[in-house]
Image (spheres, helix red, strand yellow):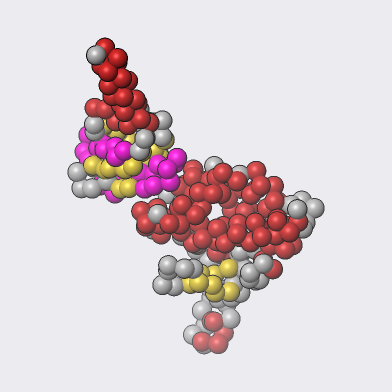
Amino acid sequence: MKYIFFLLALILTSSVVFAQQGNTNVTGVIINGSNDEPLEGVNIVNINQVTGSTTNSKGEFEIVAKANDTLHLSYLGFKSIKVKVTNDWIKFGSSTIALTELALALEEVVVNQFRLTGYLEVDIAQVPINTNYQYSISGLQYGYEAGKGTGVNKILSSIFNPADFLYNTFGKKAQEMKKLKQMKQNDEIRDLLSSRFDREMLTVLLQVDRVDLDEIVRQCNYSKDFINTATDLQILDAISGCYEEYKVLSRGRK
């Protein structure tokens, strides 16, 4: 009898531990730290699981996570933070998280002056010509601009260059680059990235800084105009395509 009781206790304990270690849905409320008002539209990304969510009008959110996962919270005009998912959070339910407002400063705006003559042919000649090429991205209804070269030819010059920037970058970040496919397949992540231009989520998920992220895209032979104007989703698709080409070339190189 004692043996059976001990066995049942062991099974129950194991079940509790397994439940704590496995994925579950954690909930929370995000508020403005200065006035305790709920914040709607805050972006929440689970860096470990590569899943995303946003807060509703009451500041509430729900996201798949497990203990020790890290959630990245970002909202326009507020300081982004990282929050660790704890066993207590999972056990006791919703948690309230406060974000701190940033002091917003207007950047200097430079307006290029054109001396318009009233003659169409003369005035058009003053407008800079964009020499980029148009490419399409799966899942989008419109194209984007990129530099010359498509397919494997885009990175041949980089992969066989002595500096080997792409090889060193992708080769050393294999785990982070595996998240590319997860990011592309997650509808929440794609929706979040499609309306963002700050590269913050990409740098967090791929564990690179903004300078390195721009350099990766540039080495993949995308234009400066594309890098400056593309949405985060377009940058994601550009890096993802380049990474797939890199894998093909790196196998041949080995």
Position of residue 149 relative to residue 69, above or below, is: below
Q: Which residue lies furthest to the top in this view?
A: 2
Question: At x 39% / y 47%, what residue is drawn?
Answer: 51
Q: In this view, does 244 lie to the left or right of 88?
A: right
Question: At x 49% / y 68%, what residue is drawn?
Answer: 137
Position of residue 212 relative to residue 27, above or below, is: below
Magenta span has 239?
Answer: no
Question: At x 69% / y 68%, what residue is drawn?
Answer: 153
Magenta span has 36?
Answer: yes
Q: Residue furthest left?
A: 58
Q: Is residue 106 left or right of residue 251?
A: left
Residue 49 percent location from the top left of the image: 42, 43
Residue 14 location, quadrant: top left
The N terminus sits in image quarter: top left
Numbered-mark total = 0
Residue stretch rendered in magenta on the structure? 24-52
Residue 171 percent location from the top left of the image: 66, 47
Question: At x 56% / y 44%, what residue is drawn?
Answer: 175
